[in-house]
Structures are given as C-alpha cells and as structure tokens.
Image (cartoon, helix red, strand yellow):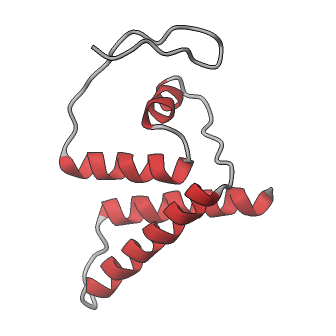
Amino acid sequence: MSAKCLDKQGRWRNKTVAFRVSPEEDELLETAVRLSGLTKQDYITRRLQEKEVVVTGNPRVYKALKNELEKVLNELKRLKKGDNVPEDLLEVIRLITITMNGMKEE
C-alpha cells in the first residue's frame, strides 16, 4: 500500500482510483502530463474536476515541449505525401499549440 500524502489544502490523499486505457490513450495522457509540468495525479485530478490546467514555464516544461516537437516533426517526416495525419498526432499538435500560446501571453 502506498503512503498517505497531503495535498495543497492539507487533505490526506489516501484513496486510490484506477482505470484502464489503451496504449494510444496512455501516450496522449503522458504527453499532456509532460506538457503541463504537473504530476500525473495532479493533472488527472484537475481535469476530472474540470479545473483549468495552468502551465508555468520551467525547464522541465521547455524540455517536454522540445522533445514533443521533435517527435511530431519525425512523425510528419515519416508520413507520405497525401497520407492523412493521425488524430492522435493532431491532438499532440493542439496541446503543444495551446501550451506555447499560453506561455507567450505571460
């Protein structure tokens, strides 16, 4: 059993919630978490509560953006002319765009 954990409001986080996702959904979730700069637990909790996920620029977020842009570029290069861009790749591009636009406004 994992150790109890206090959140920012001083509440104990001692309940476990688990669910299954496909490998593709997991990769999208992992990408969103990396781009947010939050822990996976905090990211999922905020999204489930329909709270805004605010990205604060830090070295970890910049590195995640760089790595994700590199992955997108490689995937786009791999696609042949006339191929449809996969929905998952479009979603990653959308997340990167939202993150970059938000950082530009700061």
User: Is 76 positioned to the left or the right of 101 in the image?
Assistant: left
Residue 78, given in percent of the width and then of the height, sits at 26, 84
Q: Residue at x 38, y 15 (%)?
A: 3
Q: Which image quarter is the N terminus in?
A: top left
Viewer-proximal residue among 95 and 59: 59
Q: Residue at x 48, y 26 (%)?
A: 45
Q: Residue at x 68, y 62 (%)?
A: 101
Residue 67, given in percent of the width and then of the height, sits at 45, 69
For residue 87, above or below residue 70: above
Residue 39, given in percent of the width and then of the height, sits at 49, 37
Q: Check the image and name the residue furthest to the bottom.
A: 81
Viewer-proximal residue among 32 and 82: 32
Q: Which image quarter is the C terminus in?
A: bottom right
The answer to which image quadrant residue 72 occupies is bottom left
All told, the count of numbered labels is 0
Viewer-proximal residue among 42 and 82: 42
Viewer-proximal residue among 57 and 5: 5
For residue 13, above or below residue 104: above
Q: Residue at x 28, y 91 (%)?
A: 81
Residue 25, given in percent of the width and then of the height, sits at 27, 46
